[in-house]
Image (cartoon, rainbow, N blue to C red):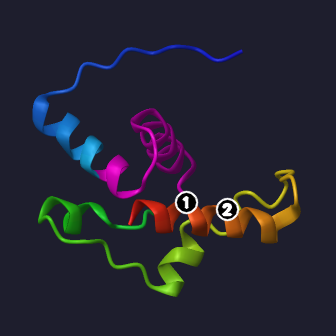
Amino acid sequence: MPKTVTLRLSEDIYQLFHRRAEADHRPLSNLIVTAARRQLEGAPDMELTPALERGEPPVLTARRLLSSGLVGIWKTRKVSGGPAALARRLRAHAQKRG
């Protein structure tokens, strides 16, 4: 059963988390849980924070992306229409935003 945890963050730390979550297009809570899990489990960090702190877009190389744990994260997820349909929906959604 999910648990609720309250964190008290200084404004600068909150802004750091917030900017990173926005850059990753995900909720702040997901970013914090993922970062904490990586730290506790010793997963390699993508080292994007310094670039974000400077206001630069993060640079993702293929090697960094593969070592991030993101590749294959949804491999067991059931998607209506299959992976190709999901890719089409995500692409269409991204084009509407952009």
Pointer 2 and pointer 1: residues touching (CB < 8 Å)?
yes
Magenta-span inclusion, residue 82: no
Residue at numbered disc 2: 89
- At a point 39% along the width and 37% down the height, the residue shown is 28
Residue at numbered disc 1: 93
Left or right relative to 70: residue 97: left
Front-most of residues 6 and 83: 83
Determine crowd level at label 2: few under 14, some 14-19, many 20+ residues with C-alpha closer than 10 A.
Answer: few
Determine crowd level at label 1: few under 14, some 14-19, many 20+ residues with C-alpha closer than 10 A.
Answer: few
Residue 10 appears in which quarter of the rendering?
top left
Query: What amino acid is found at the position of numbered circle 1 in the picture?
Result: His
- At a point 28% along the width and 43% down the height, the residue shown is 17
Query: What amino acid is found at the position of numbered circle 2 in the picture?
Result: Arg
User: Which label number is shown at residue 76?
Assistant: none
Q: Secondary structure at mark 1?
A: helix
Left or right relative to 97: residue 70: right
Farthest residue, direction bottom:
62
Residue 88 in the image: state x and y as whole percent.
69, 69
Front-most of residues 20 and 63: 20
Residue 96 in the image: state x and y as whole percent.
47, 62
Q: Which residues are magenta?
A: 20-43
- At a point 33% along the width and 50% down the height, the residue shown is 22
Which quadrant of the figure contains the C terminus? bottom left
Residue 15 appears in which quarter of the rendering?
top left
